[in-house]
Image (cartoon, helix red, strand yellow):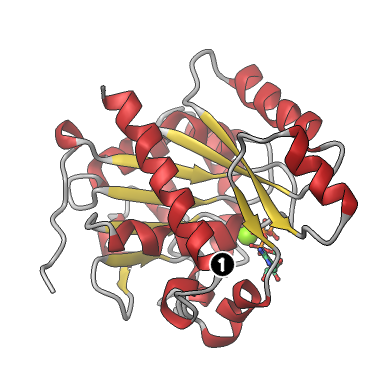
Amino acid sequence: MQEPDADRPSSGGATIAIYSVKGGVGKTTFAANLAWYSAQGGHRTLLWDLDAAGGSGFLYGLEAKGSGLAEEVFSRDRSPAKLIQRTAWEGIDILPADESIRALDAQLMRIGKRKRLARLTEELSANYGRIVLDCPPVMNELSAQVVRAADLVIVPLPPSPLSARAFDLVVREISGNTRRHPPILPVLSMLDLRRALHRQARDANPNWPSVPYASAVEQCAVHQQPIGVHSPQSPAAQQFARLWRAIEAKLAERAG
Ligand SMILES: Nc1ncnc2c1ncn2[C@@H]1O[C@H](COP(=O)(O)OP(=O)(O)OP(=O)(O)O)[C@@H](O)[C@H]1O
Ligand SMILES: [Mg+2]
């Protein structure tokens, strides 16, 4: 297989943040699986885990090499390149989280550089065509930096009669924090069409992409492999592939 090239920002490099203020909505699942489809699409891809829980690394069978280093990328100008690890798959690398990331918000406040993360992703885009950020469920200086760094924000939303309202709240929180923000794409996550409320949520938001509730998705944590590797033909895998194509289409709009 041909080694995917890094594409420079000028040729369309992009940072995609998977973000919500809510916990347990599917952020890490999205980040890990979408990063894989990004690499399949020929982009050299970096999955950057910004959550101390370290879920993205786990889903690829990786852990941070040293403890307490992940945060020094921000506070001490440690080069992120030294912390990046290769995965078992061509074209996708991971910058894992560790415990030190828990204190990142306070560190960013102390450092006072509002675009620290944006500068780092810009530097990394010399080597990576796509950078996928797995975010913790917070609204603070870190999430504000994520929004400044991202070209596109993906918000996974569990289906409910309140999905649209929940999405509006995230948009409001993001736009309250920064004057200019990137496009924000809502996605129904864990959609179970056997449930009437889920069908209602889908029908109320017919243009939103969705990912089904599926054991194949849960199996990612068992196999420590993306769904495209262990269950490529499953409906959930096909929806992730389709979602990635929608993301690329959105990024192309921006470039055009
Ligand atoms: N489509 C799905 N089908 C079945 N299970 C899912 C699906 N999406 C996510 N899950 C499961 O739901 C749980 C929460 O998902 P995940 O860790 O991705 O959420 P998160 O938003 O990253 O959570 P946190 O805020 O704690 O970081 C996990 O156990 C995951 O396996
Ligand atoms: Mg997570």
Q: Is residue 195 left or right of residue 224?
A: right
Q: Residue at x 36, y 36 (%)?
A: 249
Give the image location of residue 146, x and y in percent. 50, 37
For the N terminus, the image quarter is bottom left
Is disc 1 placed on a helix, strand or loop?
A: helix
Q: Residue at x 77, y 58 (%)?
A: 193
Q: Residues within 10 Å of mark 1 (few under 14, many from 20)?
A: some
Give the image location of residue 244, x and y in percent. 42, 50
Q: Is residue 212 above or below residue 199?
A: below
Q: Is residue 245 left or right of residue 198?
A: left
For the C terminus, the image quarter is top left
Q: Is mark 1 within 8 Å of ligand 1?
A: no
Label 1 belongs to which residue? 235
Q: Is residue 213 above or below residue 150?
A: below
Q: Is residue 111 left or right of residue 103?
A: left
Q: Residue at x 61, y 54 (%)?
A: 27
